[in-house]
């Protein structure tokens, strides 16, 4: 599989290299903190890694069922707001990957409000919520997810109001 | 079930996690270093546990960017250091909803006015979401 330019970005590796370099400098200057940092890192990883397995499984499921084609098809239905919320939550990949599709849909009459709601819900990543649960608890995560989903509607309406986003074609999309 | 689609879905998921792992490991090391070198009194001096906390949390989350997983790890550690849940929530919500780094790309693709108003409203709404969420959780618990 050929990677796109953005997917080949070395930034994550550079970030890790800088962090490891910082760690090495610190243990040279203060060797007594070595085990404290290692112990803290192991504790954190033990908290995170089991959730990542579930995250992987959920990512596979959403990748299988949700494609760009599915999203376009449902935006063209009657329930635009609901589509924006649900597919915003289920869509995967970096946000900039979706700009061309959204730009195209906008040209075809999709309102700014729908786009804002879709983008807001992209911040709710259902597959990685298990990790959030491990830190904050199930009640908090459910409440936050629901509040964010409702707030996304509010933002959609605000953006429509400010930008006059609902154009004459948007009823059909 | 289409076998090729399943393999594609697995490959895509694997790639997404593979891309996130270096940053995640980097953040784990940074958080561990900060735990050793930054006493919790420093956090307490920045966050005073009042409404201003949510504003500070949102501002920090807006400037910083990255995978939501990273914000959960940092948020969890901030909470362990005694930072209020409102501030931590505002931080995590603005981290994922405000995209200052993507703003130029968003402006080009979706319009300057749209991008600016979306990001400003996301910032304001992150404070609203934080306060409302913590209030509801408080009532339920």
Image (cartoon, rainbow, N blue to C red):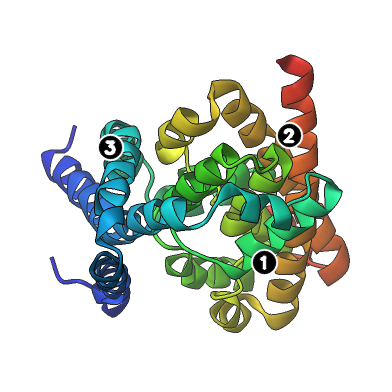
Residue carrying label 3 = A49
Q: Is residue A137 above or below residue B34?
A: above
Disc 2, disc 3: CB below 8 Å? no
Helix, strand or loop at mark 2: helix
Mark 1 vs mark 3: give the one in front. Answer: 3
Mark 2 vs mark 1: give the one in front. Answer: 2
In the image, are marks 2 and 3 on the same chain? no
Helix, strand or loop at mark 3: helix
User: Which chain hosts label 2?
Assistant: B
Q: Is residue B119 visible to us here?
A: yes
Label 1 crowd (10 A; few <14 / some 14-19 / many >=20): some
Residue sticking out furthest to the top: B141
Residue carrying label 1 = A109
User: Which chain hosts label 1?
Assistant: A
Quarter occupied by the C terminus of chain A: bottom right
Q: Is residue A142 above or below residue A106?
A: above
The Cα–Cα distance between marks 2 and 3, rounded to whole angstroms, is 27 Å
Disc 2, disc 1: CB below 8 Å? no
In the image, are marks 2 and 1 on the same chain? no
Residue A96 in percent (x, y) is at 47, 70
User: Which chain hosts label 3?
Assistant: A
In the image, what residue occupies the spot 54% across and 74% down? B102
Residue A23 in percent (x, y) is at 28, 65
Residue A76 in percent (x, y) is at 58, 51
Q: Is residue B120 above or below residue A70?
A: below
The answer to whether A169 appears left or right of B79 in the picture is right
In the image, what residue occupies the spot 62% across and 75% down? B110
Residue carrying label 2 = B133
Residue closest to the eye, A80 or B125: B125
In the image, what residue occupies the spot 87% across and 62% down? A161
């Amino acid at each position: 599989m050929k990677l796109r330019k953005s997917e080949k970005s070395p930034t994550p590796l550079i970030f890790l290299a800088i962090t490891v370099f910082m760690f090495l400098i610190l243990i040279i200057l203060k060797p007594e903190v070595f085990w404290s940092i290692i112990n803290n890192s192991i504790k954190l990883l033990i908290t995170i890694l089991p959730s990542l397995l579930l995250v992987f499984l959920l990512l596979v499921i959403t990748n299988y069922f949700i494609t760009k084609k599915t999203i376009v098809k449902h935006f063209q239905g009657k329930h635009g707001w609901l589509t924006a919320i649900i597919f915003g939550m289920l869509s995967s990949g970096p946000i900039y990957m979706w700009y061309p599709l959204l730009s195209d849909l906008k040209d075809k009459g999709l309102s700014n409000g729908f786009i804002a709601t879709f983008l807001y819900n992209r911040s709710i990543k259902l597959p990685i919520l298990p990790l959030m649960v491990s830190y904050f608890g199930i009640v908090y995560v459910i409440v936050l997810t629901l509040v964010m989903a409702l707030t996304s509607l509010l933002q959609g309406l605000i953006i429509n109001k400010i930008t006059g986003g609902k154009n004459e074609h948007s009823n059909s999309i | 079930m289409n076998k090729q689609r399943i393999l594609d879905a697995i490959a895509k998921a694997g790639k997404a996690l593979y891309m996130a792992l270096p940053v995640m490991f980097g953040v784990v090391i940074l958080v561990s270093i900060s735990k050793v070198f930054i006493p919790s009194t420093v956090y307490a001096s920045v966050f005073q546990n009042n409404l201003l906390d949510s504003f500070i949390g949102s501002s920090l989350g807006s400037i910083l960017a990255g995978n939501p997983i990273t914000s959960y790890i940092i948020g969890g550690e901030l909470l362990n250091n005694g930072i209020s849940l409102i501030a931590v929530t505002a931080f995590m919500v603005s981290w994922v909803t405000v995209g200052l780094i993507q703003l130029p790309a968003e402006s080009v693709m979706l319009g300057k006015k749209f991008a600016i108003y979306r990001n400003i409203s996301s910032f304001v709404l992150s404070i609203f979401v934080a306060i409302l969420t913590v209030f509801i959780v408080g009532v339920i618990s």
